[in-house]
């Protein structure tokens, strides 16, 4: 006898052999025992999940000797004929090859005859969604009222392509992807029957790549036996099919959660050089992250796909990683997967996605604020700040006499009266909580910028923290010193002075205030005021808070129009007008539009010129 591949040799023969489809098997067995048989069945499911095998087993149960019955003998003649496709009462049709209306007409003639030996004349159409619309319509009447000895069984992977009129006439059974552990255990049994040593990890790797398809897994095992011989381990599976082992995936996950970006990129480089599929690697990483998320929120539902030697390390990292961070990690990886689908350079987008994933774990969000207020430690995240240029005290002394153009000259740096124990004024933010660096920022452009700074000046001995009153006074003086930039400053809220790191909150939509506070003039003025008032350099940190008052919209009035002072010359008329009184009335009507002099003396124009230090040039 010629060689048979595993997918055909180990095809299910009875209902007990069907794996992972208990809901379908139980329903069909109950229908046979209770004699509640329908005239049309539709099996729906992915490839390799047992649609054709279940249809053949159902046909055997209907046409076996003494049938219909569930516990039939698969070795009797009629059952062997059905399994081999040579029984006259069971006709299997490929819907992709016999999709025309002529084939359906022949089928209608076929079902009119009584069965030759069995109880039913069964018509099985595989990939039924490939039939044309005309073929479906020609089958409708026969399908709705078939002869009592006829039964239709349809199978498809795309039920949405079948006409609703066909679906409504069938009992539908959805075959699900077979679980990974069931496929792995079945592969181990097949290998044992064939005298092949298959490790459990290798069987699990094959089942993972098969993605719920038993036929795919059996074909892969057949290929591995041809390549490896009588011993198959996980490394053989990785080499043949380009998949990544569970240990490697777990190691990559540890690098991500531990924020070891160089080690992670080095691992990706090694896998790429070994010929691993980058898309498959990302898919396995996402599966591992999903397993971590399930373990975090519902440990009893975890499938245990993480290797034993990595569970303790991952558990330690998982304890310090909040759920929202894991969800954010999954979102970043999902976006990278979407970008990889439409790109030929998959490694580039994988590396970018992994870099973003590591940085997403280092970002602070509103959940971190809540945890910080509850006393939990914040993640050790490097922050980007805006450093105000430090101005030394001698520079302030030299600039004070020459500050005539400024509205308010900087005060002389006189040391305040010594205090035995200077106490900082109370702050609206708890002193035992450090404000995190990752509050929600304005979207476009980002509110944090690196501003070139001079060498910072060491604070004097009498340096003290900045208070809310100091901030109000400093901001008012800075706005008065720079009227143009100061006119754009809206409402602000003093949050905290954390050893010179000044947290100032603005409204999320107040872009003008953010830009004004980051301007060079305001930065210099604020720094001078901080040196003069508190004797220290400060670092400005701008955050957003919806509690801050929204900026008041400024209504811009259009400029008034005016007419020329000199009236236009009247045209010379040869004949007297029919209504001479009308032009005289129009000339006598006073004009409501302002003259040129009135426009230049308008209070709004004068206020604008004063605010912006502008000069109006007359044409």
Image (spheres, rainbow, N blue to C red):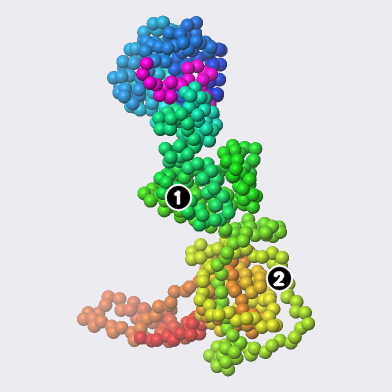
Q: Which residue lies most toward the front here?
A: 230
Bounds of the magenta segment: 1-20
Q: Mark 1 falls on what kind of element?
A: helix
Quadrant for the C terminus, please: bottom left
- The residue located at (49%, 48%) in the rendering is 334
Compared across the picture, whether 361 is left or right of 86 comes to right
In the rendered image, residue 114, in percent from the top left (x then y), is placed at 39, 7
| Cα distance in 3D space between marks 2 and 1 | 53 Å
Residue 390: image quadrant is bottom right
Residue 147, percent from left and from top:
41, 11
Under tag 2, what secondary structure? loop
**617 or 578, nearer to the observer:** 617
- The quadrant of the picture occupied by the N terminus is top left
Identify the residue at image location x=60%, y=40%: 308
Between 103 and 56, the residue placed more toward the observer is 56
The quarter of the picture where residue 87 lies is: top left
Q: Quadrant of residue 508?
A: bottom right
464, above or below 431, in the image: below
- Magenta stretch prevailing secondary structure: loop
Question: Which residue corresponds to mark 2?
Answer: 427
Mark 2 or 1, which is nearer the eye?
1
Q: What is the number of the mark on residue 18?
A: none
Q: Is residue 59 left or right of residue 254?
A: left
As drawn, 29 above or below 373? above
Residue pointed to by mark 1: 270
């Amino acid at each position: 006898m010629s060689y048979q591949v595993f997918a055909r040799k180990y095809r299910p023969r009875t209902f007990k052999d069907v794996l992972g489809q208990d809901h379908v098997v139980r329903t069909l067995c109950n229908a046979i025992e209770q004699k509640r048989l329908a005239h049309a069945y539709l099996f729906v499911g992915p490839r390799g999940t047992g649609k054709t095998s279940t249809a053949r087993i159902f046909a055997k149960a209907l046409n076996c000797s003494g049938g219909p019955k569930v516990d039939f003998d698969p070795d009797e003649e009629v059952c062997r004929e059905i399994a081999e496709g040579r029984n006259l009462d069971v006709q299997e049709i490929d819907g992709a090859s016999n999709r025309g209306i002529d084939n359906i007409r022949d089928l209608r003639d076929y079902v009119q005859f009584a069965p030759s030996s069995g109880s039913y004349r069964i018509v099985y159409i595989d990939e039924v969604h490939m039939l044309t619309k005309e073929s479906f319509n020609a089958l409708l009447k026969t399908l709705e009222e078939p002869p009592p000895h006829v039964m239709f069984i349809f199978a498809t992977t795309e039920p949405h392509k079948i006409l609703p009129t066909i679906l409504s006439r069938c009992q539908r059974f959805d075959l699900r992807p077979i679980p990974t552990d069931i496929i792995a255990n079945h592969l181990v049994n097949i290998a044992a029957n064939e005298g092949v040593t298959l490790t459990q990890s290798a069987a699990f790797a094959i089942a993972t790549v098969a993605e719920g398809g038993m036929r795919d897994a059996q074909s892969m095992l057949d290929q591995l036996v041809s390549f490896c011989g009588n011993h198959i381990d996980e490394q053989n599976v990785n080499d043949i099919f380009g998949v990544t082992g569970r240990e490697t995936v777990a190691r990559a996950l540890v690098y991500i959660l531990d924020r070891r970006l160089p080690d992670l990129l080095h691992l990706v480089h090694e896998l790429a050089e070994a010929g691993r599929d980058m898309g498959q690697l990302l898919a396995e990483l996402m599966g591992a992250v999903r397993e971590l998320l399930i373990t975090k929120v519902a440990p009893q539902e975890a499938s245990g796909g993480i290797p034993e030697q990595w569970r303790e390390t991952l558990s330690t990292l998982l304890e310090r990683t909040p759920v929202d961070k894991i969800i954010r990690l999954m979102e970043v990886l999902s976006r990278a997967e979407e970008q990889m689908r439409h790109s030929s350079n998959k490694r580039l987008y994988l590396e970018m996605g992994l870099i973003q994933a590591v940085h997403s774990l280092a970002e602070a969000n509103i959940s971190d604020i809540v945890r910080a207020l509850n006393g939990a430690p914040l993640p050790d995240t490097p922050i980007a700040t805006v450093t105000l240029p430090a101005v030394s005290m001698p520079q302030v002394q030299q600039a004070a006499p020459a500050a005539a153009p400024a509205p308010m000259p900087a005060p002389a740096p006189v040391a305040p009266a010594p205090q035995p124990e200077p106490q900082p004024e109370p702050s609206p933010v708890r002193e035992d909580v450090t404000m995190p660096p990752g509050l929600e920022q304005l979207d476009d452009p980002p509110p944090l910028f690196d501003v070139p700074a001079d060498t910072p000046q060491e604070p004097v001995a009498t340096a003290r923290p900045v208070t809310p009153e100091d901030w109000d006074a400093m901001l008012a003086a800075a706005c008065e010193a720079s009227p143009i930039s100061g006119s754009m400053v809206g409402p602000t809220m003093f949050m905290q002075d954390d050893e010179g790191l000044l947290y100032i909150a603005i409204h999320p939509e107040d872009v003008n205030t953010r830009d004004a506070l980051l301007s060079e003039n305001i930065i210099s003025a604020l720094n001078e005021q901080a040196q003069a008032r508190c004797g220290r350099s400060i670092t400005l940190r701008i955050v957003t808070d919806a509690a801050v008052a929204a900026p008041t919209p400024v209504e811009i009035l259009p400029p008034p129009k005016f007419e020329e002072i000199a009236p236009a010359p009247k045209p010379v008329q040869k004949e007297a007008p029919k209504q001479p009184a009308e032009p005289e009335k129009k000339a006598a009507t006073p004009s409501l539009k302002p003259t040129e002099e009135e426009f230049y003396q308008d209070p709004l124009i004068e206020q604008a010129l004063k605010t912006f230090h502008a000069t109006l040039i007359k044409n």
